[in-house]
Image (cartoon, rainbow, N blue to C red):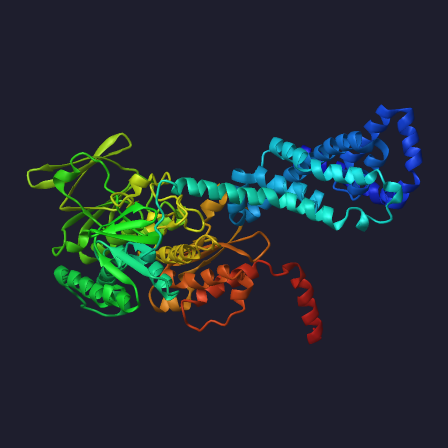
Amino acid sequence: MNKARLLIVALLAAAILSYFLFDLGQYLTLQYMQSQIATFQEFRDENFVMAALVYFLVYVLISAASLPGAMIFTLLGGAIFGLLWGTLLVSFASSIGATFSFLISRTLLRDYVQSRFGDYLAPINRGIEKDGSFYLFSIRMVPLFPFFMVNLVMGLTPINVVSFYFVSQIGMLLGTAVYVNAGSELAQITSLSGLVSAPVLFSLVLLGIFPLLGKLIVNSIRKNKIMRGYKRPSKFDANVVVIGGGSAGLVSAIIAVGAKAKTILIEKDRMGGDCLNTGCVPSKSLLRSGRIMSYIRRAGEYGIEGAAATVNFARVMERVQEIIKTIEPHDSMERFTSLGVECIAGDARITSPYSVEVNGRTINTRSIIIATGARPMVPPVPGLNEVGYLTSDTIWTLRELPRRLLVVGGGPIGCELAQAFNNLGSEVTQVDMASRVMPREDVEVSEAVMEQFRKQGIQLLTSHKLTRFGKAGETKFMEAEHEGETVRVEFDQVLLAIGRKANVEGFGLEELNMPLTAQGTVEVNSAMQTAFPNIFACGDVAGPYQFTHMASFQAFFAAINSLLGGWWRLRAKYNVVPWATFTDPEVARVGLSEAEAKSRGIKYEVTRYDMDHHDRSLADGEAHGFIKVLTVPNKDKILGVTIVGYHAGELIGEFVFAMTHGMGLKKIAAVTHIYPTLLEGNKFAANAWRNKRLPEKYFPWLEKFFRWQRGA
């Protein structure tokens, strides 16, 4: 604790101690003030300036230290100085004292509160940064909110000090005048409960609520302004039009039609979107074939000799398509039509916030949900078009295994496909600008994956910046800059996996001047609402998470809010967001990583359980990896979990459930897990947290006690 904080704590402690030690509260009672009115008034008549100064300083001290008695002192100001001077003195003294109290709270508590509850307070902080003065003004207008509590709570927020003072000065003025005026009759007041009549209090509450109503009116005017140029139809063909038949669009449509709303779904390509056709389903099917081949190569570890196999790559890719076709009916137009959704194949175009055109037909709708997904990004590297390239969308057309595959990108998609093709027999080179693959994860996670990749023969070129692609005869090559030198890599096929770009072009958003984020996604609030009050967006097109399960999560809020028509809004919270990368070893995470906790200044403790001595992992020949849990210091509350190893994507589920429902490691430790299962690793990690807190200092005494019991 620095000197400034120590000084504040000392002064505050001295003020509070003095208050109780010298029983100063007896001088801040209604009875005492009433008995001393004549004395106070006489002193005022003899020396007005001195009386005003003493009153002012004492009021500031009471307010700054959050001591009880501010209301009594306000009444006294009216009794001694009258309405004009009393209001003037109280107004400035209370605002200055409130600002001191605000600063005390900010200095002593804000860093601690923000570091501990930063993730939960992030939406509040953003709201305060945007409209903090407005909300403070509304609260100050309502005398039902405790004066000192407002000071302390606002000190924990990002609101500017100057704004706090001036808003408090103005916001409390009317209430101050009412109480000062009541103080002019201090001698006749019998109790504080009868100080101000119910009608007066009700009027003040209405005054406090009025700014909130004003904001609603302003927002309504703003919304009407943005919608002013568009004619609202007298009747509608649909309650909701969903554009995009991927995960977000399908979930939105099924929720809307389930609520019996007239729902139209428009998809220009294939139902199921990226996840079914080019993403999750095909990639995991390919990974499975690659994993089987890796086990055949490892057969000797399991006592199986002479195992060998040849990869029929065309058959591998046919199997991928067969699995897609097996799942396809779940997402088909036929199924959704049977559920009551009107499905249209075609290019949708939003022509106004109330209308969508498709195949020459204009559909008038009350709400629109944009769920157009994203597509692979293509870097502007010279020569790329000349050599040709594959993406996660087009690689599924391959029927011949590339002898030499260059993978550009070290994120989840690049890592998964690099390892899959390596397992199937390609010579894989993976290149990335970052210093390590999977840079969003902790360093030890990247190192575990990179170690396995190198062990399997994947050539990793990190910290390499692409400069150009080209051909030398029939040979394709890539050149990259690394530590000032040019590195050349020859290849037969190149896969681009450097990220995905939101699909926001070509269907009317440009004409609407739809606001986009810096990342190029549609800008939405926590209700999935865009700048247009009846247009919503969810999934990859909205971000910030490009996961199928998060697209479905957002779709729920987009669908429900699109049907509520602005009367009420459900808001999405991203407190517990899990994901997994299905490499070998698998990597799964929920909540904070250690690097993120450090960057945000969040204090944490780490508990780690290594799987190299885990019974089931040993039996399966997969005894590698770890479970790392971040908790609040000295508590079992989980801040984040990272799992690296065999079936990490399955193991993380227990921690996701625990975090979602506010359960800590003690709850997981108390659960009986089947032996021998991988899931036991979660219990062992929880036990590791408990073991670090055993009262070891008492063990020698216990040893003596048990020795005494034995009569030894």
In-front residue for pair 133/239: 239
Q: Residue at x 22, y 65 (%)?
A: 323
In-front residue for pair 143/288: 143
Indicate the position of residue 38 as horizontal and vertical percent values: 93, 35
The answer to which quarter of the image holds residue 13 is top right
Question: Can I make out residue 209 in this image?
Answer: yes
In the image, farthest residue toward the front: 234
Question: Can I make out residue 26 in this image?
Answer: no
Indicate the position of residue 224 as horizontal and vertical percent values: 43, 42
Residue 687 located left or right of residue 543: right
In the image, farthest residue toward the bottom: 710
Indicate the position of residue 9 as horizontal and vertical percent values: 72, 39
Q: Residue at x 48, y 43 (%)?
A: 219
Residue 552 located left or right of residue 6: left
| Quadrant in which the C terminus is drawn | bottom right
| Quadrant in which the N terminus is drawn | top right
In-front residue for pair 359/389: 359
Indicate the position of residue 502 as horizontal and vertical percent values: 30, 45
The answer to which quarter of the image holds residue 270 is bottom left
So how many labels did they put on this image? 0
In the image, farthest residue toward the left: 473
